Image: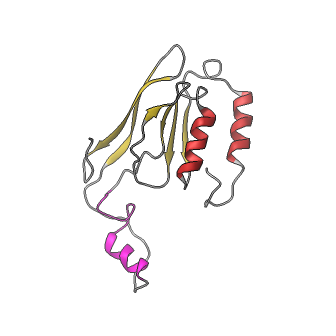
Amino acid sequence: MGNVFMKKCDDVFAISKKFLTEYKLKEDYDFLVVDFHGEITSEKNAIGHFFDGKATLVVGTHTHIPTNDARILKNGTAYQTDAGMCGDYDSVIGMNKDNSLKRFMKKESTKHYPATGDATLSGVIVDCDIKTGLANKIESYVFGGQLKNT
């Protein structure tokens, strides 16, 4: 988990550095997928560069909106700042939009509850090199619901 604007947890860079000194791609595992659950894009981008060449994929989660920056980093790690959510995009990050608007406008509302419209599946598809454990190709994936692959 990220450290900026998130509930305090261990320092993500210190823990990642410790992990990378103990474990190595293609020695301890064939592929390494890092799901970085963070609030801000700069911290997600930094962890992507930190793992570049040492992980197959670094993909961000938490902000619920897919970013349009899927790419292979310089040393072969697939990267996307945020995969997006799997849920109803005719909503406020998956929650009922009318109730969410009331909450933002400080009107009487109820506790957040999920939107119930058509769901969209969002994520990434990565083609990997079995010999190196690194990525050859990454594509954003969006299926169904409000959003469309472009």
Q: Where, by quadrant of the figure, is residue 138 drawn?
A: top left
Residue that sits furthest to the top in the current view: 131
Could you tell whether 13 is left or right of 110 in the image?
right
Q: Is residue 102 above or below residue 91?
A: below
Could you tell whether 118 is left or right of 140 in the image?
left
Q: Where, by quadrant of the figure, is residue 3 drawn?
A: bottom right
Residue drawn at (37%, 80%) of the image: 102
Q: How is the image coloured?
A: secondary structure
Q: Is residue 42 above or below residue 8?
A: above
Residue drawn at (64%, 61%) of the image: 7
Q: Is residue 63 above or below residue 17?
A: below
- Asked if residue 140 can be seen in this view, the reply is yes
Position of residue 32 measured from the top left corner of the image (x, y, whole percent): 56, 29
Residue drawn at (41%, 49%) of the image: 84
Position of residue 147 measured from the top left corner of the image (x, y, whole percent): 27, 50
- Asked if residue 110 can be seen in this view, the reply is no
| Quadrant location, the C terminus | top left
Could you say which is closer to the camera, residue 115 or residue 147? Answer: 147
Q: Which residues are magenta?
A: 88-105
Residue that sits furthest to the bottom in the current view: 108
Position of residue 47 measured from the top left corner of the image (x, y, whole percent): 60, 41
Position of residue 4 measured from the top left corner of the image (x, y, whole percent): 63, 57
Q: Is residue 98 above or below residue 13?
A: below
Could you tell whether 128 is left or right of 1 in the image?
left
Magenta includes 51?
A: no
> How many marks are shown on the rendered structure?
0
Could you say which is closer to the camera, residue 93 or residue 119? Answer: 93
